[in-house]
Image (cartoon, rainbow, N blue to C red):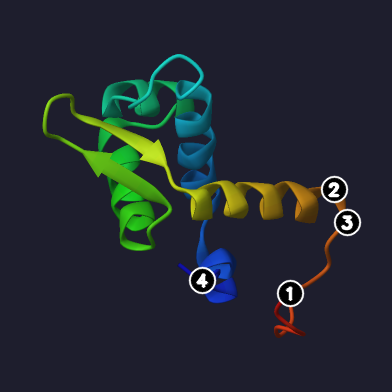
Amino acid sequence: MKLDANVLRYLGRDEFRVLTAVELGMRNHELVPAELVASIAKLKRGGAFKCMGTLLRHKLLHHEGKVYDGYRLTPLGYDFLALKVLVNRGVIVGLGRQIGVG
């Protein structure tokens, strides 16, 4: 999956709180339950589920509900978290076009 800068632009504070909550939950769990995500992110249950739906649509989270119902970060989700940290620190000002491959 390619990194889409437009998705990064329109993600809000709550979506990044949910991404961070899933990352923190993955320290102790392979799949993080939705209730734990909501409690770590300090969001109401409905708000957390709405954010998780948005993140699932953009392929930043993956949901598995076969044996154990839970969420995990995808590599693209980790990339978005890293870019957000670099933007907050002032290391990155903007994203441009692809220069080269290889």
Q: Which residue is mark 2?
A: 89
Nearer to us of marks 1 and 4 is: 4
Mark 3, other Cα within 10 Å: few <14 / some 14–19 / many ≥20: few
- Where does the image place residue 54, in percent across and percent down from the top left? 34, 57
The residue identified by callout 4 is 2
Amino acid type indicated by mark 1: Leu
Name the residue beneath numbered marker 1: 95
As helix, strand or loop, the secondary structure at mark 4 comes to loop
Q: Which mark is first along the chain, 1 or 2?
A: 2
Q: Residue furthest left?
A: 66
Q: Nearer the viewer, mark 4 or mark 2?
A: 4
Foreground residue, 14 or 56?
56
Q: Disc 2 or disc 1, which is closer to the eye?
A: 1
Amino acid on which the number 3 mark rests in the picture:
Val
Labels 3 & 2 near each other (Cβ < 8 A): yes
Q: Secondary structure at mark 2?
A: helix
For the residues labelled 3 and 1, the Cα–Cα distance comes to 12 Å
What's under tag 4, amino acid-wise?
A: Lys
Q: Foreground: 62 or 86?
A: 62
- In this rendering, the count of numbered labels is 4
Residue count near mark 2 (Cα–Cα under 10 Å), binned few <14, some 14–19, many ≥20: few
Marker disc for residue 15: none
Q: Do residues under tags 4 and 2 come within 8 Å of each other at their CB atoms?
A: no
Residue at the outermost right position: 91
Name the spot of residue 3 as percent of width and height, x first.
55, 69
Q: Residue at x 49, y 30 (%)?
A: 21
- Distance (Cα) linking label 3 and label 4: 22 Å
